[in-house]
Amino acid sequence: MKDRPYDPFDETLSEQTLEEMAAQRAQQIEDVRRLISTGEGKRWFKRIAQNGYFFSTTMSGPNSVLNEGRRVFAIGCLIEVAMAAPEVCAQLLTELLSEEAKQLEESKKNERRPKAHRAK
């Protein structure tokens, strides 16, 4: 069967086709589960999240459309990981939020310092 999105209004889908689609989706989820269980997969997901504007606005500057595209891709990856391994996803998001909070706190400290003491 060719990959095609499920259309609930397509009356030509047979029971076998639906079973094939379910099996294919189950395999996709298992692939993500295996990937995210490795150190490499976790680092990959963190890179996607960090570059995907999870924690910042996308609609500013000349690259708004590009940034929003990155965000949509990253959210798609987040959904896949959340479906495959919800506990790992929660752990990784907690780590990312912690890192984001540390960076925000550091930038606030730098804003409060006199200009002569700011790191260059």
Image: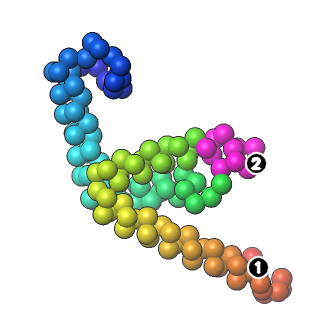
Q: Quadrant of residue 57?
A: bottom right
Give the residue drawn at x 27%, y 40%: 28
Say what secondary structure mark 1 lies in.
helix
Q: What's the residue type where badge 1 is placed?
A: Glu
Residue 102 image point, x, y percent = 57, 77
Colour scheme shown: rainbow
Residue 69 image point, x, y percent = 58, 41
Identify the residue under disc 1.
Answer: 111
- Give the magenta part as a residue range: 58-68
User: Does 26 lie within the magenta span?
Assistant: no
- Calculate the distance from the C-alpha at mark 1 to the C-alpha at mark 2: 22 Å
Give the residue drawn at x 24%, y 28%: 21
Q: Quadrant of residue 113?
A: bottom right
Q: What's the residue type where badge 2 is placed?
A: Gly
Give the residue drawn at x 34%, y 24%: 8
**Seen in the image, is 90 located left or right of residue 116?**
left
Identify the residue under disc 2.
Answer: 61
Label 1 crowd bin: few (<14), some (14–19), many (20+), radius 10 Å: few
**Seen in the image, is 32 located left or right of residue 114?**
left
Q: Earlier in the sequence, mark 1 or mark 2?
A: 2
